[in-house]
Image (cartoon, helix red, strand yellow):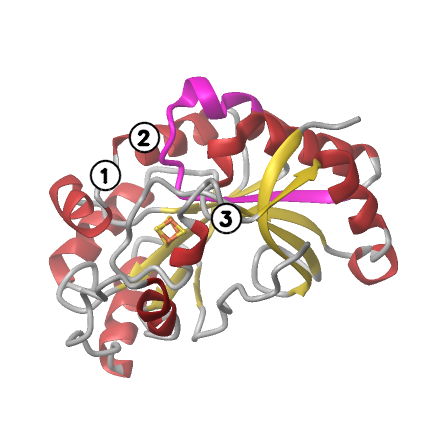
């Protein structure tokens, strides 16, 4: 028997959440309320379906031939809200010989997350805003735990793919980007910075759930603004990967 947890959905042929082809398991539950969230149906930790870490990895193994050169990614929601479940999936996947990745906003305390961070091979860490005050406005939480998570990952030499959503009027501002670039340039653990231009692909879910979408009037970024962001980050010697609308909304409900 493994550890019980709640799952939102599974993507069996993921190509954006880590290297190679990935089996991506999206866990249910998130304490943040990002204004641009394209999966608000992951928020409620009581929804989704109950599963068992042993069953998750057994299902993953049935796709072994596809993901041999990739691996497994535990995403969300916020997977660190179910740290024991997440850690057990990762450890079982590693025992089966797979590369493992964790997709997280790092918004829980290190007391809860440390063992998962120690176990996983790669962390996809999403910094919502380098400005703590802006982070509160944008997500309902500050960025202290995320930045402490990055410090810890640096201290243990864990590879990180840093993620950052470019939101016009918020994070996609010259000064914000310079501050972010200055901060990130200190870290040797960051292999690449993934810049994710804001999009409204998940807006329909907000409507379906009866939530008010706060960014209705916010435009998607222009190419020039995205290029400006890229140049600012690259100027600090960081490798940038631009992701254009290929972070798909999560729709494959299991169970
Ligand atoms: S951390 Fe992710 S799942 Fe949670 S609110 Fe933000 S975008 Fe949505």
Q: Nearer the viewer, residue 121 or 250?
A: 250
Q: Nearer the viewer, residue 24 or 197?
A: 24
Nearest to the eye among marks 2 and 1: give it. 1
Q: Which residue is mark 1?
A: 141
SS at badge 3: loop
Q: What is the residue that sits farthest to the top in this orientation?
A: 111
Residue numbers of the magenta segment: 98-115
Q: Residue at x 21, y 37 (%)?
A: 142
Q: How many tags in the picture?
A: 3
Q: Earlier in the sequence, mark 3 or mark 2?
A: 3
Q: Is residue 62 above or below residue 131?
A: below
Q: Residue at x 46, y 33 (%)?
A: 81
Q: Which residue is mark 3?
A: 76
Q: Nearer the viewer, residue 128 or 241?
A: 128
Q: Residue at x 26, y 66 (%)?
A: 229
Q: Which residue is mark 2?
A: 145
């Amino acid at each position: 028997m493994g550890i019980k947890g709640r799952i939102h959905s599974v993507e069996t042929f993921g190509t954006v959440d880590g290297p190679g082809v990935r089996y991506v398991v999206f866990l249910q539950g998130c304490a943040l309320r990002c204004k641009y969230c394209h999966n608000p149906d992951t928020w409620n930790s009581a929804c989704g379906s109950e599963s068992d870490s042993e069953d998750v990895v057994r299902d993953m193994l049935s796709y072994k031939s596809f993901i041999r050169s990739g691996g497994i990614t535990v995403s969300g929601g916020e997977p660190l809200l179910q740290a024991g479940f997440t850690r057990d999936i990762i450890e079982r996947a590693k025992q089966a010989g797979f590369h493992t990745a964790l997709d997280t906003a790092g918004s829980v305390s290190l007391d809860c997350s440390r063992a998962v961070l120690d176990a996983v091979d790669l962390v996809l860490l999403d910094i919502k805003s380098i400005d703590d005050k802006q982070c509160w406005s944008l997500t309902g939480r500050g960025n202290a735990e995320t930045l402490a998570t990055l410090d810890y990952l640096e201290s243990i030499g864990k590879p990180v793919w840093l993620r950052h959503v470019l939101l016009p009027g918020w994070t996609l501002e010259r000064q914000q980007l310079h501050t972010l670039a200055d901060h990130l340039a200190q870290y040797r653990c960051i292999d690449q910075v993934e810049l994710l231009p804001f999009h409204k692909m998940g807006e329909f879910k907000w409507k379906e759930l009866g939530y008010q979408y706060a960014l209705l009037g916010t435009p998607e970024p222009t190419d020039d603004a995205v290029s400006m962001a890229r140049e600012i980050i690259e100027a600090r010697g960081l490798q940038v990967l631009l992701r254009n609308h290929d972070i798909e909304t999560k729709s494959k409900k299991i169970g």
